[in-house]
Image: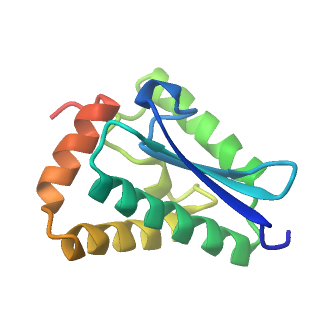
């Protein structure tokens, strides 16, 4: 997998996400990195999610983990949400079976740092994003 020739970042309605998330990435057939971020959150939160997705993707790339493997795990985890194995407060990326776990953990750290650097509150960020994803408080 070579470095994508393009990176396409779009904000979309929460309801259009492929999984239970506020940010998502995949590489399409034309080797373009596609990133989608929920449009209902502030620009500061969108920037934090963007950094999370970029870090996660590039760590996956370095480890040889591709879109298909990540999407297959996310589909499995969505099924596990559906059957009640996990509450939505449990993030797929922290699961020890997750192929993008290392990228997710570092993405999470960059996301948290970005919120702080932009002068916002991590607690407020979590409340807003959890509410958007339907996570029970």
Res 109 quadrant in image: bottom left
Instruction: Give residue 102's position: percent from left, percent from top.
Output: 53, 71
State the residue at coordinates (35%, 35%): 88
Q: Nearer the viewer, residue 125 or 104?
A: 125
State the residue at coordinates (42%, 31%): 14
* Left/right of residue 125 with respect to residue 61 in the rendered view: left
Location of the N terminus (image quadrant): bottom right
Q: Is residue 26 above or below residue 18?
A: below
Instruction: Give residue 89's position: percent from left, percent from top.
Output: 30, 41
Res 94 quadrant in image: bottom left
Q: Is residue 61 above or below residue 77?
A: below
Location of the C terminus (image quadrant): top left
State the residue at coordinates (56%, 27%): 79
Instruction: Give residue 18's position: percent from left, percent from top.
Output: 58, 32
Res 86 quadrant in image: top left
Instruction: Give residue 53's position: percent from left, percent from top.
Output: 52, 60
């Amino acid at each position: 997998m070579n470095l994508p020739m393009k990176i396409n970042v779009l904000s979309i309605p929460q309801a259009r996400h492929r999984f239970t998330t506020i940010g998502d990435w995949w590489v399409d057939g034309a080797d373009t990195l596609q990133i989608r971020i929920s449009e209902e959150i502030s620009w500061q939160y969108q920037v934090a999610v963007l950094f999370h997705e970029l870090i996660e993707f590039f760590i996956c790339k370095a480890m040889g983990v591709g879109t298909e493997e990540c999407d297959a795990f996310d589909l499995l985890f969505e099924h596990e949400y559906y059957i009640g194995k996990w509450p939505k407060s449990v993030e797929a990326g922290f699961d020890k079976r997750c192929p993008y776990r290392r990228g997710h953990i570092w993405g999470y750290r960059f996301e948290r740092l970005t919120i702080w650097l932009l002068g916002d509150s991590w607690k407020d960020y979590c409340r807003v994003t959890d509410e958007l994803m339907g996570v029970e408080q």
